[in-house]
Image (spheres, helix red, strand yellow):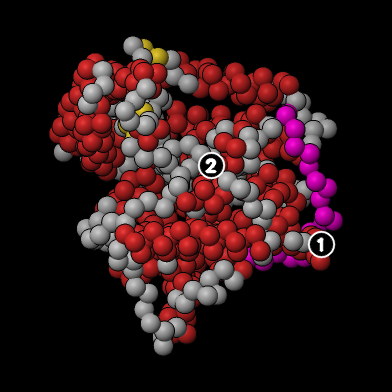
C-alpha cells in the first residue's frame, strides 16, 4: 500500500536499481503515431454552423465509437519498445480514459453551464486551458488592435459561433448539481464583461465584427439569466463521489493514489506548512515586516530586478541550463501595478516578487513548447483532459520550496514565510477539492475551509480567488490536489535520481532531463527518468 506520508521526500536506497541508461528521444513507432493522429481528430466534436456539436445524439455517437479506439490501442504490440515509447502508449491510453470519464461521469456538456464559456481575455499559464470548456475558444489575448484583416476575420468567426453554441447549451444542459449551476451563471457574466471590454477596441474596424461581438455578448447574458433562473431549482450535489475520484486518479491522472491517500497527504502538508511557518516567524521575529509594493515605479524596479536575480541564480548555481528566452518569458508576465485591495497571490507577489517567479516555471514550460518543439509528436502539444497537471502545477509548486532549499532566498528576509503560506493555501484548497467530490462539502463550505486555513487572512471570502479556484476544482476533479500531489511525486523523483547517481548527480543534468521528457504525468516521468518499474508505477500501468 502506498505510504503517502513517507514518500514525500524519502526512499530506501537499497531498493533502487543501478542508474538507468538515458532513454533516446524520438518519434514513437508508426502505428502508434498514426493512431494518435486519428484519435485526436476523432476526439474533436463536429461543427454545426461553426459551433461544436455537443447534442445528446452527437455525444452518444462518440461514446459508442470509443471502445473501438481502445481496442485499436490495445492491439498494438509494445514488446521490445523503449521505456519512452511505452510511456507514449500510456499517454494515449490516459487520453482515451479521459474521454471515457467525461462520457460516463462528468458529462460537462450536460451538467456544467461554465463549459459553454469560450471567450477568454487572458492567457492560461498551462499548456492547455484549465478544466473543461467547449472546443473552439476565442483567446482575446492573442489579438493586437487595431486588427489586421486576417485577424478580424478569425475573431469574427469565433464570435459568430458563440450564439450558436449558447443556443445549443439550453437544450443540452440537464444536470442537477446546484453548485455548478450557481457558479455557471457567474462564469457566463464574466464572459459578458470580457466581450463588453472588447467592444471599444473594435471601433474603426469592420462594422460586421462589432455586430458579431454585440450578438455574442447578448447571447451570453441571456444564457446567464436562464442559468441563474434554473439554478434556483437545482438541488443535487455537484461532486463525483469517492469511487469515481479513485478511478480518475488511477486511470486518467495515472497516479498511484486514492481519494483517502490524498486526504492524508493534504492534511500532512497543511500541518507541515503551518508548523514550518510558525518556526520561520519565530526565527524572523526581530526582522522588519515585509512591506508590499506601493507604487508603479517600485513595482517595475522590484519585479524587473526579481527576474534578473532569479535567472542569474539559476545560471550561476547551475540549477538548470538557462536559455536566452527564459528571462523574456518571465518579464512578459510581470504585469502592471494595481492599487487597492489585493487578491491572495498579489499579497504574496507584492511582498517579495522573487517568490512567485519560481512558480512562473509555467512560462518556461510554455515557451519551451513554442521555441523547442518536442521531437515526439505525442508530447509536442498539450495532452488532453489536463493529464499534464501533476507535472506542470506540481513542479511549479514544488519549485518554490526547492529553491528555498537551494538558497535562492538567503538574501530575502522573511521570504521563507511566504513559501509556507503558499503551501498551506495549496493544501487547504485541495482538501476543499476532495471534500466537494466526496459530497461532504458544498462549494461555499470548501471555500470557507480554504479561507480559514490559509495563514495571514489573505485568502479572503470577500475576494474572487477562493470561490473561483473551488469552482475550477469542482469542474475538474484532482486539479486542486495536483499542486501538492505533483510536488510530492517530483520530490520523490529527485530523491530517486540523487540516490541512483550518488556523486555523479547534478541538479543541472537532472533538470535538463526533466524538461526534455516533456509535460507528462509524474508517474510516467519517474519511470522514464529512473528506468525503475516500481510497484506504484506497475499499479498505474495495469489500471483499467
Q: Residue 125's mark?
A: none
Contact? badges 1 and 2 (CB < 8 Å): no
Q: Quadrant of residue 347?
A: bottom left
Residue at the spot x=47%, y=51% of the render? 331
Q: What crowding class fits label 2: few (fewer than 14 Cα within 10 Å), some (14-19), or many (20 or more)?
A: many
32 left or right of 334 in image: right
Q: Where is 81 relative to 523, above or below?
A: above
Part of the protein shown in magenta: 1-28
In the depicted structure, whether residue 247 falls above or below residue 465: above
- In the picture, the disc for residue 504 is 1
441 in the magenta segment: no
Residue 42 image offset from top left, x and y in percent = 53, 18
- Please tell me the numbered disc located at residue 366: 2
**Residue sitting at x 52%, y 48%:** 328
Q: Position of residue 395 (x, y in %)?
A: 56, 54
- Would you say 354 lies left or right of 18 here? left
Furthest residue to the top? 49
Looking at the rendering, which quadrant does residue 222 occupy? top left
Q: Where is residue 493 in the image (x, y as percent from the top left)?
A: 67, 56
Horizontal side of residue 68 vs 332, given as left or right: right
Q: Earlier in the sequence, mark 1 or mark 2?
A: 2
Q: Could you say where residue 45 lies in the image, as x and y percent from the top left?
A: 44, 19
Amino acid at each position: 500500500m502506498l505510504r503517502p506520508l513517507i514518500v514525500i521526500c524519502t526512499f530506501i536506497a537499497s531498493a533502487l536499481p543501478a542508474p538507468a541508461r538515458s532513454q533516446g528521444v524520438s518519434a514513437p513507432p508508426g502505428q502508434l503515431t498514426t493512431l494518435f493522429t486519428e484519435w485526436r481528430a476523432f476526439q474533436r466534436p463536429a461543427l454545426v454552423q461553426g459551433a461544436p456539436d455537443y447534442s445528446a445524439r452527437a455525444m452518444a455517437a462518440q461514446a459508442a465509437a470509443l471502445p473501438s479506439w481502445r481496442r485499436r490501442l490495445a492491439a498494438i504490440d509494445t514488446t521490445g519498445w523503449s521505456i519512452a515509447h511505452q510511456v507514449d502508449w500510456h499517454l494515449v491510453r490516459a487520453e482515451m480514459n479521459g474521454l471515457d470519464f467525461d462520457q460516463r461521469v462528468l458529462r460537462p456538456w450536460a451538467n456544467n453551464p461554465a463549459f459553454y464559456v469560450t471567450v477568454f481575455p487572458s492567457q492560461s499559464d498551462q499548456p492547455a486551458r484549465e478544466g473543461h470548456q467547449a472546443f473552439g475558444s476565442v483567446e482575446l489575448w492573442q489579438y493586437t488592435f487595431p486588427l489586421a484583416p486576417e485577424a478580424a476575420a478569425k475573431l469574427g468567426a469565433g464570435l459568430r459561433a458563440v450564439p450558436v453554441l449558447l443556443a445549443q447549451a439550453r437544450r443540452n444542459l440537464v444536470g442537477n448539481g446546484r453548485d455548478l449551476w450557481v457558479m455557471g451563471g457567474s462564469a457566463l457574466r464574466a464572459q459578458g464583461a470580457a466581450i463588453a471590454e472588447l467592444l471599444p477596441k473594435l471601433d474603426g474596424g469592420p462594422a460586421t465584427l462589432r455586430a458579431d461581438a454585440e450578438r455574442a455578448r447578448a447571447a451570453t447574458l441571456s444564457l446567464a439569466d436562464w442559468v441563474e433562473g434554473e439554478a434556483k431549482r437545482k438541488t443535487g450535489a455537484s461532486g463525483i463521489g469517492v469511487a469515481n475520484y479513485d478511478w480518475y486518479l488511477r486511470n486518467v491522472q495515472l497516479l498511484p493514489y486514492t481519494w483517502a491517500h490524498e486526504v492524508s497527504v493534504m492534511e500532512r502538508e497543511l500541518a507541515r506548512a503551518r508548523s514550518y511557518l510558525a518556526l520561520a516567524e519565530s526565527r524572523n521575529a526581530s526582522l522588519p515586516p515585509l512591506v508590499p509594493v506601493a507604487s508603479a515605479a517600485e513595482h517595475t524596479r522590484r519585479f524587473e530586478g526579481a527576474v534578473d536575480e532569479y535567472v542569474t541564480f539559476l545560471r550561476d548555481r547551475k540549477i538548470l541550463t538557462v536559455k536566452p528566452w527564459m528571462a523574456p518569458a518571465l518579464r512578459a508576465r510581470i504585469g502592471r501595478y494595481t492599487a487597492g485591495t489585493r487578491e491572495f497571490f498579489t499579497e504574496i507577489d507584492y511582498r517579495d516578487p522573487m517568490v512567485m517567479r519560481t512558480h512562473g516555471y509555467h512560462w518556461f514550460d510554455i515557451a519551451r513548447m513554442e521555441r523547442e518543439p518536442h521531437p515526439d509528436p505525442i508530447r509536442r502539444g498539450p495532452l488532453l483532459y489536463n493529464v499534464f497537471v501533476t507535472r506542470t502545477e506540481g513542479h511549479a509548486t514544488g519549485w518554490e520550496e526547492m529553491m528555498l532549499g537551494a538558497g535562492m532566498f538567503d538574501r530575502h528576509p522573511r521570504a521563507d514565510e511566504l513559501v509556507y503560506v503558499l503551501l498551506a493555501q495549496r493544501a487547504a484548497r485541495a482538501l476543499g477539492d476532495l471534500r466537494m467530490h466526496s459530497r461532504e462539502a458544498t462549494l461555499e463550505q470548501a471555500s470557507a475551509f480554504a479561507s480559514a486555513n490559509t495563514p495571514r487572512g489573505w485568502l479572503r471570502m470577500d475576494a474572487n480567488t477562493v470561490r473561483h479556484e473551488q469552482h475550477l476544482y469542482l469542474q475538474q476533479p484532482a486539479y486542486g490536489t495536483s499542486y501538492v500531489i505533483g510536488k510530492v511525486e517530483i520530490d520523490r523523483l529527485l530523491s530517486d535520481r540523487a540516490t541512483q547517481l550518488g556523486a555523479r548527480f547534478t541538479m543541472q543534468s537532472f533538470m535538463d532531463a526533466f524538461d526534455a521528457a516533456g509535460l507528462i504525468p509524474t508517474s510516467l516521468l519517474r519511470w522514464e527518468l529512473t528506468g525503475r518499474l516500481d510497484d506504484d508505477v506497475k499499479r498505474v500501468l495495469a489500471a483499467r
